[in-house]
Each structure stands twice: as C-alpha cells, then as structure tokens.
Amino acid sequence: MSGQSAHPYEGLPSSAFWKTAVSNVGMFDIRDVWVPKFPISPKHKVATFGSCFAQNIGGALRDRGYSWLISEEAPRAMSRESRKRFNYDVFTCRTGAIYTCTLLRQWISWASGETSPPDEIWERDDRFIDPFRPRIEPGGFDSRDELMQSRTVAIEAFRHAVEKANVFVFTLGLTESWWNTAGGYEYPLCPGTVAGEYSAARHGFRNQSFGDIRQSLAESVDRLRRLNPKIRVLLTVSPTPLTATASGRHVLAATMLSKSVLRAVADDVANHTRDVDYFPSFELVFSPPFRATFFGPNMRDVTAQGVDFIMTTFFDAQAAAFGDAARPGAPAPERRPRSAREDLACEERLLEAFGGE
Amino acid sequence: MTNATTAGGAATRVCVLGNSHVGALKLAYDADPSLASRMRLTFFAARGDEMRHLRLRDGRIEASTPLLEHSIRHTSGGLSEVDPQAYDAFLVYGLELRIQPPADGFFSRAVREQTARDAAAKTAGLFAVELLGEAGAAPVFVGLGPSPAAGESTALGRDPGYAAIFEALNAAVFAPLGVELLGQPEETFADGWRTDRRFSIGSRRLDVGDEASNELHPDNDSAHMNEAFGRIWLQAFETRLRGLRAVTSAAK
C-alpha cells in the first residue's frame, strides 16, 4: 500500500504473534517456546537442585539416557522405594529442597568453606532433626553426632557436584523465607512446622523482593563459577503454587506475586549472564493456553503427564537446536510441516497488519 | 510349636534348609559320625534358587516342582517334605543371605538397617524363614552364607566392621522375626571381609543325586567352601545348640 513504511513487526516469525503461535494452534502444537542457549547432551553431567518441582528433572534426564549426576549414592542394596523415602536420588545429593536463591547461596557458601553451617539442631521425640534438611531422614537421626556427620557428607557431596557438573539446573521455588535473625541464616521451612520451636524473638519472615533475589542468584552463579569456571546454569521456575503464605495476602495472590518475581529474576539473570539459560517449565504449566490441564485435582500438584510434557518440550527443543542427541552427529530433525490452516492464519495476520478487511 | 528338647541327652534333631552352600556343612557332617551323636541334621537342599519353590501344605513344607522334590529327597535321605513336629530346631543356611563389605561412605543407622531389610527381602533365605514361621517351626537359626574367598590371603582375621553390619542385619530383619542370626566363624576370615582361601580349595558341588554331584568346583570358584570350613561351622553351631539345650533343660 502506498505511503506505508516498513516497521519492526513485519517479517517477524509466526511465533511472535499470539494468534498464529497460540490461539490458532492446539495446545500440544505450540512450538519454539524455548530456543536453548547451549546444548545439553547425554555426555554432559547434569546436577539438579531446587524446589520440590526440581525432583522431576533428574529422573526424567536419567530415563532418557542423560547423565544425571548423583554425588551422594545410596547403598547399592537399598530399594527404589527406600531411596525415595530417605531422599537419595531425589536431587543430585541429599540437600533436601532448596527453595530460594538465598538458600542456594547458603549451601554454596558452606560447600566452598566460606562459612560453616550453624550448630543449631532440632529435637523431636528423642530424635534429632536437621533444621536445614528437616525431612531428609523419615524418623530423624539417632544422635547429634550422626546428624552432623550426615550433614557434612551432604555438604561435601554438594561441593563435589558443583565441581564435576557440566550443567547446574536450579529450580526457583519461593520468595517467602524464614530466617534466624541473630545468626543471619535461613531455614528451608519455618521452625515449628515440622520440628523445632518457633519464636518470634528469634525467627523472622522475609518475602524477598526482586532486588534481593536477583542479587542472591547472581552471587550464587558467581560462586558456582569459582568452584567450577566452566559450569553452565539452567534456571527454571517451579509451576507449583504455594502451599501457604505468611505474607498476609490471599494465597492465590501471593502465588502470582512469587512466581512473577521469580520469573522476572530468572529472565534477567539469564539475559545478562553468559552460560546461564532459562527453560520455561513454568509457562508450559501455568499459562492460559494449557488451561490448567497439567494440574491435579488440588490445582497445585503437577501431574505426571505435565512433567512428561515439560520434559518432552525440553528434549525436543534441544534436538531442534542442536540435533538429535540420541544419535550423535545426526542432523537436526525436520520440522513438522506447517499445515495449510497455519499458513492461512499467518497470511491472515499479515493482512491485519496491512489493515485489510 | 516345636522346641528343642534335652530328652535324656538324645541328639538334637535339626532340619537344615539350604542351597549349594550347605554342601560344605553336609560333607563335614557325613564325614564325622561323632557330630551325629550330638546333633542329627537332616538336609533339605537344592542348588541355585530352587528352594524358592518350597511351599506349605497341610502344615508341612514340601516341594512344588519335581526338580526340587528330587533334590530334597536325595539330600534328606529319602524325605520329600518337612514335618515341623519331627525336629527340635531349624537352620536356614545360605540361600542368598550373607554380609557384604559396606559401601564407601557414611550412612546413618536407619539407612543401614533399611538397606539390610531391602537386601534380605529379596532372598530365598528370608522366604524360607517366613515359611518356617508359618509352619510354626521354632527355634529357627539363620546361618549367613560364607563370604567369598580371598585371592591369596595376606592376613588372617575379620574386619571389626563386620560386627556392625551383622548387628544392623539382625536388628532390622531377624530379631523382629524371633530367629537367631549366626555369623561366619571369625577364624575362617582373611583380609578382613573374605574367607581364608584354604577353606575354598577343594570345595565340591552339592550332592543332589545328579551327574554333577560332588564334582570339584572350578578353580576360579571363590563362593563355595570345603569340608574343613563346614567342620568349623558345625562345631560352632553345635556349641550354640548345646547352649540351647542347657537353657531348655534348666527351664524344665
């Protein structure tokens, strides 16, 4: 049309437009949500840590023939069920869930020797509970000594994992956090909920801001690199809503705030840090096109189908970008040919851009 | 429920359930008539995992396959079933139950015990123990199978860690079932966790009445033990039975 100048939206791929990329395609036909920054191949050692959702990643990697790094092995004869109960083969080592970036920074600090873990131990029914891994053993430990030995093993295993991993996958889970105000250290769970004793005088709540979390995540990446200069980091945000909030807000609002902040932090750090990428597992579950399909009846737990969809998207994106890892050297798989309907939608979108009726 | 008796000094009647490892005990028992005067062992044994085909029927333990029936009939000297009433004590020997050296690294007591439970759960030995329990058989002893033989033994003696694992296994699995766990005699150990090689040389295949019966095991077989090992083991077992008889006699 005469008189109309070119503009940035012309020539964008269909993935840039909601109509052609989302509303006019089926849920499972949404493509190119993630274009990975770096390859993750079966030969790469992948360490996984983070919130509860991160537990799904390691097993999925292993099932696909990838090298999920385990730096704290269970006794060989221990059954699969027992391993899960005792938190072996859940994350790369027995840290328990690391819900926040400040907890991650704390673990890295212990592993590097920069700081030592506090002496604090909780007791319950003559058993000893680790405040930093409160559910690591189903019935707690026999003694303080046994607890401390186990914790030392986990810290050493964490260090070993960082040193050996090619890729460090971290799932950001929470912004809300509980602290020992005098000691300046963080608990994964509020004291008194699983064990220990809550005291308003000793314990403080912090719903961390974008700035707090961004700083702690950037510092964590920096410290990971001091232990392993070549390590690459893959960030994800857990799609699992908050179980509860201490923020004073409705849990729905608190969940959206938390996920929004974490998503923004992950994006900002990934965009500004070399060898750090973000994988959109959160979007694949939480965003409107998926219609909460992958949540269970409680609208909180992600179903096995959801996990499978997430991991399939992960591996498909890797294959599309870098070739099929299962067949080293094989060419990238052919993209699924666009259907006539899609082509029509694309042309239609173009017509809209030119003002056609 | 059957109890060990003193019965005027009569030999204790022991039913032995086992796999190929029981061969060493049987060789030693058959070679020493004096043992029979103190304990009368009846062996119900088969090679491999054939003993998993035992079943309980009408209060007696019998074979559910022809192969197993053939084996136990031969090893027992003609019996095809175990009548729990006919014995004063029961011994489950080997059947995949043995102590392995611990994995490297630290594990809590709870982890070690759970691991012991998980390992035992899969064994023919625990299956046999539970079958005896269902049959009302008592007392039941469990003899751990021998540790593999060392290559060239350099130092005799058992690693102190063996006792910790033994205790974990006993606490986790056998004590709750009311059975008594018997370890491998300390004097048979070498290199801490292995059996002294001299107890493996000359071991023979369990005699189940087939062509391979009593054949020497190949030189590279480090799993099976010989008659000398069997003799030491039975002497320790007989001492334990004597203690049982003394307790039972005192109780009367």
Image: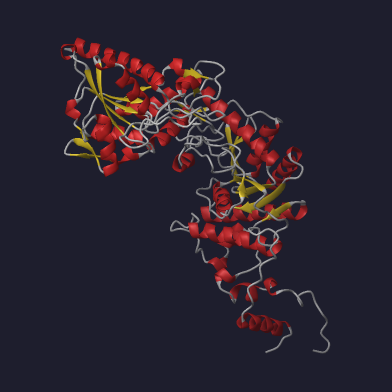
- Above or below, B38 relative to A89: above
User: In the rendering, at what x and y percent does residue B171 appear?
Assistant: 38, 25
Which quadrant would residue B144 be assigned to in this image?
A: top left
Q: Residue at x 72, y 74 (%)?
A: A13
- Could you tell whether A154 is left or right of B179 in the image? right
- Above or below, A304 relative to A154: below
Of residues B60 and A228, the one nearer the viewer is: B60
Q: Is residue A250 visible?
A: no
User: In the rendering, at what x and y percent does residue A289 appear?
Assistant: 56, 68
Of residues B174 and B232, the one nearer the viewer is: B232
Which quarter of the rendered picture does the C terminus of chain A lie within? bottom right
Which quarter of the rendered picture does the N terminus of chain A lie within? bottom right
Q: Residue at x 47, y 37 (%)?
A: A78
- Could you tell whether B178 is left or right of A247 in the image? left
Q: Residue furthest front?
A: B211
Which quadrant would residue A120 be assigned to in this image?
A: top right
Q: How is the image coloured?
A: secondary structure
User: In the rendering, at what x and y percent does residue B90 appear?
Assistant: 26, 25
Which quadrant would residue B15 be assigned to in this image?
A: top left
Q: Is residue B222 visible?
A: yes
User: In the rendering, at what x and y percent does residue B95 appear?
Assistant: 37, 33
Of residues B237 and A154, the one nearer the viewer is: B237
Q: How many marks?
A: 0
- Could you tell whether A8 is left or right of B67 in the image? right
